[in-house]
Image (cartoon, grey):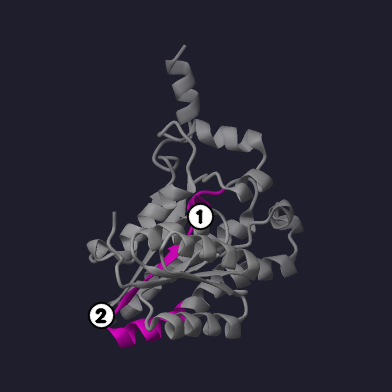
Amino acid sequence: MADLTGKVAIVTGAASGIGRATAEVLAADGASVLIADINAEKAQEVADQIVGRGQAAAGFGVDVGEEEQVRAMVEAAVTKYGRLDILHNNAALTSADVISRDQEWTNFDPALFERVMRINVVGYALGAKYAVPQMISQGGGVVINTSSTDAILSALVRPMYGASKSAINALTRSLATQYGRQGIRAVGVSPGMIITEGARESVPPEIIAILNKHNLTAREGRPDDIAHLVSFLASDKAGFLTGITVQVDGGLTAHFPTYADDLAVAQV
């Protein structure tokens, strides 16, 4: 268990899925957490549940694509808790409606692509824009960005999503490079197929089954798999880690594309 006692964190997209699991783990490990989400009511529900367990949390409604709202989010955390040590940029456009329209470059909707990039990339950059100066003024902090295996491998679908996550990897390296000597670490986490409520709604079961055939761990990924890594990366135990993106994908990206076929042949 990481020790985050006395640290303050913001987690975006924290009302559900990976964000919620991460916020809960950070709070359990001692951090005071601002639960930030476009669904303000649900964010407050998550915060209330955390507080009910004797931990520190508050809800905050934010559209990370809107600069003034992101600025207000950072200010709210600092006003309530006095500092900011951890920013977990996690919010992304992953609804079934968006994924169903993210299919091929030859018929993509430029307006939708702009919206995807606005939330998935500009939103992360805005978080850093306002969080990093606050962290520097305190002597340091860490920005943790949620990437994806789609950033390094291409599927037949979700090209806009993949492009946005590739940009996140570059953003992580750039933040680490520009502000490392001022006490800022920037790291990424790159989930494979993590079975959240949203994943079950937007990804067909047959696709999930195919991906699971390629996991070396022989099980589906869970939100807690990401949450515990984020907590470690946010802690002082990870103080020499920066500028990297960690694959958390059950080994999905570690092997030849023929792995599942090879395994089937070996079992005959």
As measured in the structure, the alpha-carbon distance from the residue carrying label 2 to the one carrying label 1 is 30 Å
The image position of residue 257, as x and y in percent, is: 48, 35
Mark linked to residue 18? 1
Instruction: Give the mark count.
Output: 2
Q: Residues within 10 Å of mark 1 (few under 14, many from 20)?
A: many
Which residue type carries mark 1? Ile
Give the residues in magenta.
Answer: 128-154
Report the residue marked by disc 2. 181
Q: Residue at x 61, y 75 (%)?
A: 65
From what the image shows, is residue 103 above or below residue 255? below
Horizontal side of 235 relative to 80 (left or right) equals left
Horizontal side of 105 relative to 144 (left or right) equals right
Q: Residue at x 51, y 58 (%)?
A: 20
In the rendered image, residue 265 lying in the magenta stretch gets the answer no
Which residue type carries mark 2? Arg
From what the image shows, is residue 225 above or below residue 146? above
* Residue 137 or residue 76, whichever sits in front: 76
- Residue 140 image-quadrant placement: bottom left
Q: Is residue 193 visible?
A: yes
The image position of residue 217, as x and y in percent, is: 40, 34
Q: Is residue 245 visible?
A: no
